[in-house]
Amino acid sequence: MIDMQTLHAGFAAKLDRVLDALVSDGTLPGDTNRANVAVEPPRDAAHGDLAINAAMVLAKQAKSNPRALAEKIVAHLENDDDVASAEIAGPGFINLRLTEDVWRRELLAIAEQGEHYGRSSMGEGKRVNVEYVSANPTGPMHMGHCRGAVVGDALAGLLEFSGHSVIREYYVNDAGGQVDVLARSVHMRYREALGEDIGAIPEGLYPGDYLKPIGASLAEQFGDQYTRADESEWLAEFRTASVAAMMELIKADLALLGIHHDLFSSEAELQAAGKPAEAEAWLREKGLVYDGVLEAPKGKAPPEDWEPVELPLFRSTQFGDDQDRPIKKSDGKWTYFGADLAYHFQKAETTDAMIDIWGADHAGTVKRIKAAVAALTQGAGRDVPFDVKLVQMVQLMRNGEPAKMSKRSGNFITIADMVEEVGKDVVRFTMLTRKPEAQMEFDFAKVVEASRENPVFYLQYAHARIQSTMRKAAAEGLAPSADHIAELADEDLALVREAAQFPRLIEAAAQAREPHRVAFYLGDLAAAFHSYWNAGNDDPSKRIIQSENETVSGARLFLAQQIGQIIRNGLGVLGVEAVEEM
């Protein structure tokens, strides 16, 4: 029985033993570097089940012609009971065809491991901090946050499935001027709740109706105490209350998408603890922060009130930036960049790797923040890998036309609006049907369309079709059975070959930090199953249920059952539920 090790890893181990034998007989030197040797599916399935590049990679070290080395490797592999044939292609690639028993054993492994099939220990329990969403706490979650939220959450699920210990973090930007604007906006709603006619919300404040309940709550708490009071008397109080209320709203919105963070970190608390100053000291020690004067704005005459001011500057130009960047403003407050590098320095103390999910509009910040964090963590004696994934915006459409804005928010469509209309799982899966760095459209009509062109429907229909087949079989007194999988022919086992890619796909997607690969794979698996099922429309002997043949029916039902299991496992990684019927 194949254990939790992937089929590909199992054959990689076999190849290692072959290479060990070639070292023993002097064909390969003892210090041969095997790092680039790969065992993977060939690009063209017609070439076989596995492709090996060992002869091409190792020929120079062996001081041999690649094809001659391939012949020696093949001579060993041909003796393996699981290898039906081993062929040399081109200058020295090796293509393996595996026996049917390999695929039957893999099918049994899927059944045995069930919901754990595809899980990996590659992460070795390493702690990975995934920070995503981190929207300013000034309004409900909207479409601008949705894609990054889903990508971040799916990535966290993928990393957990591949053996990492994941911390899902939300960084609360509660120290900037935007929270003062929020507090002033809430103060207007507070006065409104007390019966004052506030008229139109002034430009520059937040106009959405979502602030009315906060204003009403403060009116109940304070009465008219602050209706005519100076701003200095109520701003701090209203700021704290408003941020707390907005974070509860944000958490509720994210929960509609099935998103829950483990940790909420406050920028205001970070600054109060002196972390930015600590980070500045580290960077000065490394020569990466110095006191200097920013250049005047380029391309036009500077404003009349512009004056050269000496500020602490990070040497961004050493990392591809066009100018060094300030970590403090002229009024002594920290810039976003200064606060961000301190935040990353702090969380690097308790994690083995960090990943941030950012909007694509932050692309210009990536190099300098990664450079600063690398300097901080290495200076502290820890090398903590830090990766930033950029996510493009989504264009909302309705029947090909731009979607109208939400009345609730005032100027955008909220996540709550989306989930209410099309459902959590449709939103989540759709967000993963394209690479995050690619532009995408979300058409409310198309994402619920019952057609093959809709990847959400096509995949869910595959699972629902499997469940429907199981119910129909049960009504006829038939059931999945592993006892007769010898009845499965090559065309049945072709579906197992597709299914067996799942564990390897999980590891590759986790290494690349790309959860969309799981969605792409599930689409391919669904297409393969639909083709398998549809073959019975033209040839009744290929139908899964053979009413007059219990053994064939049992074997094919068992096969379909395991395909359903992998679909559930893959969707589970992405935080999507598989449907039982449609």
Image: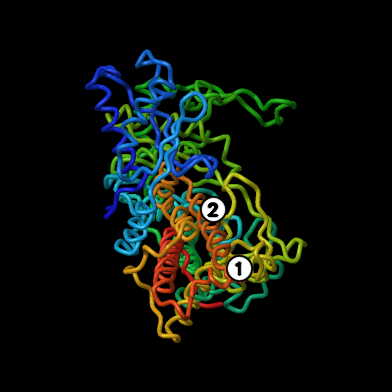
Give neighbour class at mark 2: few <14, some 14-19, many 20+ (Cα, 10 Å). Answer: some
Q: Residue furthest top?
A: 63
Label 1 element class = helix
Question: In this rendering, is residue 332 above or below 269?
Answer: above
Q: Residue at left 35%, top 72%?
A: 481
Give neighbour class at mark 1: few <14, some 14-19, many 20+ (Cα, 10 Å). Answer: some
Q: Residue 509, position in %: x, y?
A: 45, 46
Q: Would you name the residue on which mark 1 appears?
A: 418
Q: Residue at left 47%, top 26%?
A: 314
Task: Tell me the distance, in whole angstroms, between the alpha carbons under discs 2 and 1.
Answer: 23 Å
- The three-letter code of the residue at mark 2 reads Phe
Assign the C terminus to one quadrant of the image: bottom right
| Circle number at residue 239 | none
The reply, left or right, for residue 233 in relation to residue 161 is right
Can residue 174 be seen from the camera position used here?
A: no
Assign the N terminus to one quadrant of the image: bottom left
Camera-side residue of 573 and 107: 107
> How many numbered marks does the figure carry?
2
| Circle number at residue 520 | 2
Camera-side residue of 510 and 527: 527
- The three-letter code of the residue at mark 1 reads Met
Can residue 212 be seen from the camera position used here?
A: yes
The reply, left or right, for residue 49 in relation to residue 364 is left
Q: Residue furthest left?
A: 24
Question: In this rendering, is residue 230 above or below 196?
Answer: above
Label 2 element class = helix
